[in-house]
Amino acid sequence: MTPTCDFCQAADAVCEYPVSTGIATTSPVSGRADDRGTRPWAACEACAELVDGDRFGELLERSLAVAPRPDVAGSDPLFGFAKASLREQRADLFAQVALSHGPRRPLGG
């Protein structure tokens, strides 16, 4: 089973980025508790290109293209609030990844 991308949830992660600190306590996409610790972040090719290019603003927008919360429908009045909250959370996480990630390496490398 191929790991999913930790940035956009694509099912075709191709590489990973080591991080120097335990920066995430929640999944960047689902918002659920994640025992990440210092585990590397998996990335699909599209997200990896954005990480390699330090294009974290574009990475954030790509990530947010995924529904902000699977349990909140787009017609729900809470949808906008959930998306804004998720944008803030992911921006913080991705900023920390930007500061602490090492070079791209093969999955499990």
Image: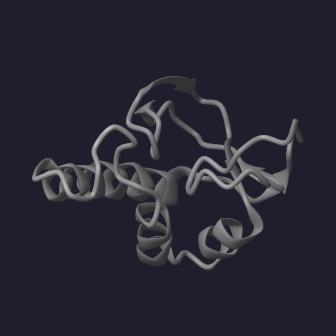
Task: Report whether 19 appears left or right of 79.
Answer: right
For the residue pair 91 and 66, the one nearer the viewer reads as 66
Q: Specify the quadrant that holds the N terminus.
A: top right
Q: Position of residue 82 (x, y in %)?
A: 21, 49
| Residue at 50% over, 30% down | 22
Task: Report whether 35 appears left or right of 49.
Answer: left
Task: Report whether 76 appears left or right of 100.
Answer: left
Up-down relation of residue 46 to residue 103 (above or below):
below
Q: Residue furthest front?
A: 75
Task: Report whether 41 appears left or right of 99.
Answer: right
| Residue at 60% over, 47% down | 6
Q: Position of residue 92 (x, y in %)?
A: 32, 52
| Residue at 75% over, 49% down | 16
Please say which color scheme the image uses.
one colour
Up-down relation of residue 59 to residue 93 (above or below):
below
| Residue at 53% over, 51% down | 100
For the residue pair 4 and 69, the one nearer the viewer reads as 69
Q: Position of residue 33 (x, y in %)?
A: 42, 23
Up-down relation of residue 20 to residue 85 (above or below):
above
Quadrant position of residue 57: bottom left
Q: Specify the quadrant that holds the C terminus.
A: top right
For the residue pair 18 and 5, the one nearer the viewer reads as 5
Q: Position of residue 12 (x, y in %)?
A: 79, 55
Q: Residue furthest left?
A: 77
Quadrant position of residue 72: top left
